[in-house]
Amino acid sequence: MLHIYCPHCDEYREEEEFRPKGEAHIARPADPENTSDEDWGNYLFFRKNPRGLHHEQWFHSAGCRKFFNVTRDTVSYEILETYKPGQQPTVTAESRQAQASAQASNQGAAK
Amino acid sequence: MQHYSGFGLLKHGLSHHENWQRMWRNPVPKAQYDVIIVGGGGHGLATAYYLAKVHGITNVAVVEKGWLGGGNTARNTTIVRSNYLWDEAAWLYEHAMKLWEGLSQDLNYNVMFSQRGVMNLGHTLQDMRDIHRRVNANRLNGIDGEVLDVKQIQEIVPHMDCSANRRYPVMGASWQPRAGVARHDAVAWGFARGADALGVDLLQQTEVTGFRISGGKVLGVETNRGFIGAKTVGCVAAGNSGVLAKMAGFKLPVESHPLQALVSEPMKPILDTVVMSNHVHGYVSQSDKGDLVIGAGIDGYNGYGQRGSYPTIEHTLQAIVELFPIFSRVRMNRQWGGIVDTTPDACPIISATPVGGLFFNCGWGTGGFKATPGSGHVFAATLAEGKAHPLAAPFTIDRFISGKLIDEHGAAGVAH
């Protein structure tokens, strides 16, 4: 079971309190009326679905009922950080690659 | 290929079963093939088999990074049915069902297809309305289906708790008598043996690391055993389809999720059909060996790890115990996860791609096993002709742009 740090509650809670809500940082087209079918389809249905680091939304459904973001490895399922909506991740595929040689020092979720 | 028969079994018995022929060769990759199939699971092997058998294209390689049938083919709960709501989906799965019905004879390999019936339970008035609608739709499409009342259900499954004072009382069910289960490994092995006998090269432990693409057309695949050329490449890689698409430079509307299943210790026969419930969300059947085969929904998060989380297992077993209190003290033997590629409309993608000569057959999500022969059959036709088989035509990637989705999600009452 995952232990997830809710940045709103400032606490680790068990996975069952949360609901995963898919990829984060998806921008809704600013002008839907003038968006092409292709762009709209891409926005609605096409996801990155990476094998590796994934920035995703979680919902603290049985807690504060607020959304937040999680950076998680989709192979090991390790959570590398959690952060509030509107913030940007500090752990990314690029930053992790640079760090890879420096030893795996990512323990627990981030703050 | 050695023909399997009762007489052969007797004959080999006389020599202590030491002279059986290997089921397939382990060939060295050729430099060039007519068609390469990426992914040696049930769907990929079926595709290769029908390419060789129906279309006479035998210069084919199946490229598999692990061993044959070692992914979702080995991890599913073996249920076969075709009672889907929408025409396009119903036709595709019914096509598969018809192939299942003659598959053991066709392959000369016992896939242990057992038409023991599948029951989809309804627990609310809305469930029952949906069940009536789906059964009617099925019958209009020539697919067998009946609506059962509680008394009829009790006759078929006397051990299920159908009392009215349950929290989720069983109110009725849809029933497809022709549905059932098949032996999942045998399906992969049977197709592999058949394809190999027709000249298909099955290349195991050969991992695709990239595609060679020139002028928008595919020339072949880069692998850990070197470059293998082919003008037509079909990818049938389930949960890793998105990874392959990324190598080829485009995105797929699929997300990979863990789907778990578990089996109990073997027991004496108690359940001779398949019981599924979408509402309490679980499904159970009993294998020939006697163990209960149990499954439910996906883990909600994206994952490639071939395992899921414990809360999902707990919810699954809660559903089973809700239906069968008699199973509450059965011990579970094994639990595992596979990676399924889910699409937004819960229907597969059998499609050309932005890269010429490169085709994908993916997005089967949680319910691909039942379609194995049908999927291989229509995808083989698609690869052979270079354009979609009529049954596969509605399942293009483009539907996610045009909006012509085939919304089986929930509508079919599918707990896969």
Image (cartoon, rainbow, N blue to C red):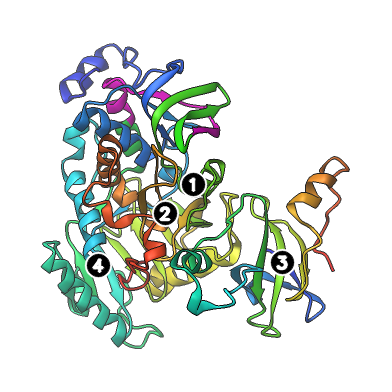
- Asked if marks 3 and 2 fall on the same chain, the answer is no
Q: Which residue is mark 4?
A: B86
Q: Are marks 1 and 2 in contact (CB under 8 Å)?
A: yes
Q: Earlier in the sequence, mark 2 or mark 4?
A: 4
Disc 3 to disc 2, how far (Cα)? Answer: 25 Å
Disc on res. A70: 3
Quadrant of the drawing holding the C terminus of chain B? bottom left
* Residue B223 on image: x %, y %: 55, 27
* Left or right of residue B252, residue A68 in this image: right
Quickly name the residue at label 1.
Answer: B241
Q: Residue at x 47, y 68 (%)?
A: A36
- Residue A59 quadrant: bottom right
Give the percent coordinates (x, y) of residue B396: 35, 54
Residue that carries the numbered disc 2 in the rendered image: B363
Q: From which residue to which does the magenta span run?
A: B192-214
The amino acid at mark 4 is Trp
The residue marked by circle 3 belongs to what chain?
A
Q: CA distance from mark 1 to mark 2?
A: 8 Å
In this picture, residue B399 sits left or right of residue A41: left
Q: Is residue B15 above or below residue B304?
A: above
The residues tagged by marks 3 and 1 sit, at their Cα atoms, a distance apart of 24 Å
Q: Position of residue A31 (x, y in %)?
A: 55, 78
* Percent of width and height locating residue B231: 39, 29
Q: For numbered disc 3, what is the local secondary structure?
A: strand
Residue at 54% in and 28% down: B222
- The three-letter code of the residue at mark 3 reads Val
Q: CA distance from mark 2 to mark 4?
A: 17 Å
Q: CA distance from mark 3 to mark 4?
A: 37 Å
Name the side, left or right, on which B336 lies relative to B199. Answer: right
The answer to whether dots 1 and 2 both sit on one chain is yes
Tag 1 secondary structure:
helix
B211 w.r.t. B309: above or below: above
